Amino acid sequence: MSERTLPSQLTAEDETASADTCPVSGHQQPTLGIETRPEGDRTAVVVTGEIDIAGVQELGDALFGALRRSVHGIDLDLSGVDFCDCSGLNVLVRVRRHARQSGKDLAVRATSAAVRRLLAGTGTLSLFAVSGARAARPETEPELRAEIMHLERAMQTRPVIDLARGVLMASFGLSAEEAWTVLVEASQNTNTKLREVAHDLVDAVNGEGLPEPVRQQVAATVTRLRTSPAAAGDKEA
């Protein structure tokens, strides 16, 4: 990506802003909830909220941990998940593969409509032995149309996030990891979905106005990353 800077919404003056002056919401964005508990020789895992690229590391850690603690495998309840994109599906596939290699299994015992659409639309529904009344109910025509819309949305999520990371890297000289940190903190501290923050940053390059809370949070995080002891050490090296 060629070197460029964002428009006036993100200027050098903003980079000197203190994180202390940046407005932060009183609570973190409640995107993902994970509860695990032993059930006999298996481990039950209940996931609620949204599964996207911002939470896949947490989800993967929880599922692999639950798998290690179980004798025969995991019973997964996804009925409380209202959004799941392909990054979430990749985690489920990886955990399932590891479970089978360990002589265990990953079984989805309940799904929300959003999760079922993703599994059905990607041809992975049968991989997880989905059971229960919700999973058994056939799709109606309106639900199938919604499935197509959902999958298109899921496929669009990752590219715009990658593009936004590239914008931040080119604009502020950040590493890929630092750019990811800026995106995640802007999402959490402004109570805005990660994909929406990414869209805002990409639109800013094209001259669209960047929402003020997002602009301030991006500037504050960039400043913190540049003035951190680790960053100072890198410069000295």
Image (tube, rainbow, N blue to C red):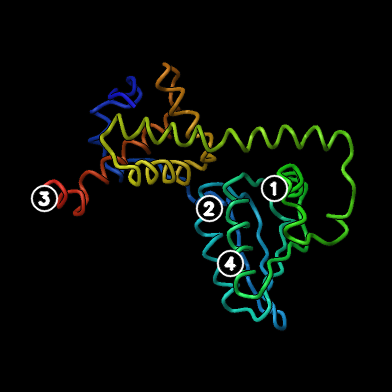
Name of the residue lying farthest toward the left? 236
Mark 4 and mark 2 lie on one chain; the one further toward the N terminus is 2
The numbered mark, 3 or 4, whose residue comes first in the sequence reads: 4
Question: Which corner quadrant of the image does residue 41 belong to?
Answer: bottom right
Mark pair 4, 2: CA separation: 20 Å
Q: What residue sits 53% from the left and 38% below the top?
A: 158
- Label disc, if present, on residue 237 of the rendered structure: 3
Residue, disc 2: 55
- Residue 171 location (% of width, % of height): 30, 29
Cα distance, mark 3 to mark 1? 46 Å
Q: Which residue is mark 1?
A: 82
Residue 226 vertical position relative to residue 229 in the rendered view, above or below: above
**Dot 1 surroundings within 10 Å: few (below 14), some, or many (20 or more)?**
some
Of the residues under marks 3 and 2, which one precedes in the sequence?
Answer: 2
Q: Secondary structure at mark 2?
A: loop
Q: Quadrant of the N terminus?
A: top left
User: Circle 4 sits in a helix, a strand or a loop, which is it?
Assistant: helix
Q: Is residue 60 above or below residue 192?
A: below
Q: Neighbour class for label 3 at 10 Å: few (<14), some, many (≥20)?
A: few
Whether tag 3 and tag 1 are in contact, CB under 8 A, the answer is no
Which of marks 1 and 3 precedes in the sequence?
1
Residue shown at 53%/49% (left/top)? 29
Cα separation between marks 4 and 1: 26 Å
* Badge 2: residue crowd in 10 Å (few <14, some 14–19, many ≥20): some
Q: Secondary structure at mark 3?
A: loop
